[in-house]
Image (cartoon, grey):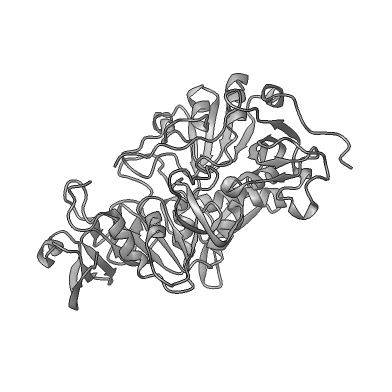
């Protein structure tokens, strides 16, 4: 995916991580989202929660520092921050279902302008891969999504309606793609910030629904 | 109490009596807490028409360690209850997927938190519960829901196990367990949901009383058989996962 335009994977994660507010409990999902725990967000106190019951983890462990029994949602070996704790799966999902998660960040195949998203089942597939996504989507206070802006065939992933079976309806508040930072607005998407090297016209051509552009549109700092 | 040790000599002995048709839970999430040695023993034991319960059937990562998917490939499985029948990344392939798509093995796809809670409920004597998870999705189609305080919830039933295969860091001879880091995951829950819990133990098994009562993660009342994991290469231990190319 090195030829994709705009932001790289870590930069997409970094942009989302800069939205985290001091004191938030943040769940990070498999894929690009777990890269948020590598982002330097200064003095803010953020607690990262992983669905497997790790509460308070930090960046991915460096070579030789790995504990093979300590992983994030993506199975990567991570580090613990001071104050960390560990619970079992039922308690971990009680944290989630109980509404204690301020934001969950997940990957997705598609997001709709009404805040639906799809991330568990592809067209024609029998079954799929749900993991913790449905629990998180239904119960976290906010859902942020990180995904590549277009498919490998250059088709939009930000759509007026999802074509794939949905994970949850009307929950997505913010979307970070390699093209920019977006909010679903009900009848389209608001482009809040644009990635370096992209134009509004390019984004409009590859985004479903009506594209509105934030006043004084800023370029994402990388 | 705790006069008799639950320690068993080997993995083969620990799984020898498991009959065809059993419902077996497998702890573990990614590498931590997976009962590799018990899975290997069950592959050799050969029980058939099993129902397997676990987070994923596995096999998307290298190096591949014993996983539920291998039992499927070995023709021992009728059904799998799990949170992944396919990988979420289209370029990853789970070995299990083709058995499910061809109809050779049945599957029930369950959201991960619901899967954990169904077993917690089974262990706690709660026959069913309502959850907001999966409401409005394909998984909820045609199923019982209920409005409670203005929100729609989906009815889910407890999931009982015949056997739980789990892995712990520390055990005493009575079966009190401690887990290390993210090794805990589904393991303590499955122990409560099973009629017979079999544990592979990493550290040398200690006498009852050597783990302080305040420090026990899973009480020995839920544990029936303990097997010491031998050193490599005889015993299987977590390995560092190879990073995948993008």
Residue A204 placed where, x, y %? Answer: 14, 64
Decide if residue B144 is on the left or right side of residue A174.
Answer: right
Q: Is residue B134 visible?
A: no
Q: In the figure, residue A21 lies in which quadrant?
A: bottom left
Residue projecting furthest to the bottom: A215
Vertical placement of residue A193 versus A197, above or below: below
Decide if residue B165 is on the left or right side of residue B6.
Answer: left
Of residues A20 and A100, which is closer to you in this image? A20
For the C terminus of chain B, which image quadrant?
A: top left
Of residues A77 and B218, which is closer to you in this image? A77
Q: Residue at x 71, y 22 (%)?
A: B13
Q: In the figure, residue A185 lies in which quadrant?
A: bottom left
Vertical placement of residue A114 versus B246, above or below: below
Of residues A39 and B146, which is closer to you in this image? A39
Residue A90 placed where, x, y %? Answer: 60, 54
Q: Residue at x 36, y 46 (%)?
A: A121
Vertical placement of residue B44 versus B184, above or below: above
For the N terminus of chain B, which image quadrant?
A: top right
């Amino acid at each position: 995916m090195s030829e994709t335009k705009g932001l790289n994977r870590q930069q997409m994660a970094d942009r989302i991580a800069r939205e985290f507010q001091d004191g938030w409990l943040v769940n990070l999902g498999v894929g690009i989202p777990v890269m948020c725990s590598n982002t330097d967000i200064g003095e803010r106190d953020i607690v990262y929660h992983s669905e497997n019951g790790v509460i308070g983890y930090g960046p991915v462990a460096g070579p030789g520092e790995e504990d093979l029994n300590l992983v994030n949602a993506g199975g990567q070996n991570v580090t613990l921050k001071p104050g960390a704790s560990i619970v079992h799966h039922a308690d971990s999902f009680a944290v989630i279902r109980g509404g204690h998660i301020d934001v969950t960040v997940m990957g997705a195949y598609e997001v709709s302008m009404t805040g639906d998203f799809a991330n568990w089942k592809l067209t024609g597939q029998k079954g799929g891969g749900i993991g913790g996504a449905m629990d998180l989507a239904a119960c976290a206070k906010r859902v942020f999504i990180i995904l590549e802006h277009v498919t490998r065939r250059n088709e939009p992933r930000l759509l007026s309606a999802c074509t794939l079976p949905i994970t949850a309806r009307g929950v997505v508040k913010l979307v970070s793609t390699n093209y920019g930072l977006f909010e679903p607005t009900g009848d389209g998407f608001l482009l809040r910030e644009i990635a370096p090297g992209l134009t509004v016209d390019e984004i409009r051509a590859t985004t479903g629904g009506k594209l509105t552009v934030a006043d004084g549109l800023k370029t994402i700092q990388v | 109490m705790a006069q008799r040790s639950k320690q068993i000599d080997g993995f083969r002995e620990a799984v020898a009596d498991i009959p065809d048709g059993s419902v077996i839970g497998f702890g573990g999430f990614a590498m931590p807490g997976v009962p590799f040695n018990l899975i290997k023993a069950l592959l050799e034991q050969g029980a058939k028409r099993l129902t397997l319960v676990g987070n994923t059937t596995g096999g998307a990562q290298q190096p591949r360690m014993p996983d539920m998917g291998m039992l499927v490939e070995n023709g021992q499985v009728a059904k799998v209850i799990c949170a992944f029948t396919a990988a979420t990344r289209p370029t990853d392939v789970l070995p299990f997927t083709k058995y499910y798509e061809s109809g050779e093995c049945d599957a029930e796809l369950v959201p991960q938190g619901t899967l954990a809670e169904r077993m917690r409920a089974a262990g706690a004597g709660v026959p069913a519960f309502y959850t907001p998870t999966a409401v409005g999705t394909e998984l909820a189609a045609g199923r019982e829901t209920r409005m409670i305080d203005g929100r729609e919830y989906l009815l889910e039933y407890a999931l009982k196990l015949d056997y739980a295969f789990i892995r712990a860091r520390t055990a005493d001879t009575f079966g009190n367990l401690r887990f290390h880091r993210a090794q805990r995951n589904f393991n303590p829950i499955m122990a409560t949901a099973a009629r017979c819990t079999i544990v592979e133990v990493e550290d040398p098994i200690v006498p009852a009383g050597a783990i302080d009562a305040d420090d026990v993660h899973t009480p020995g009342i839920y544990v029936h058989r303990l097997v010491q994991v031998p050193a490599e290469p005889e015993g299987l231990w977590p390995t560092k996962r190879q990073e995948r190319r993008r």
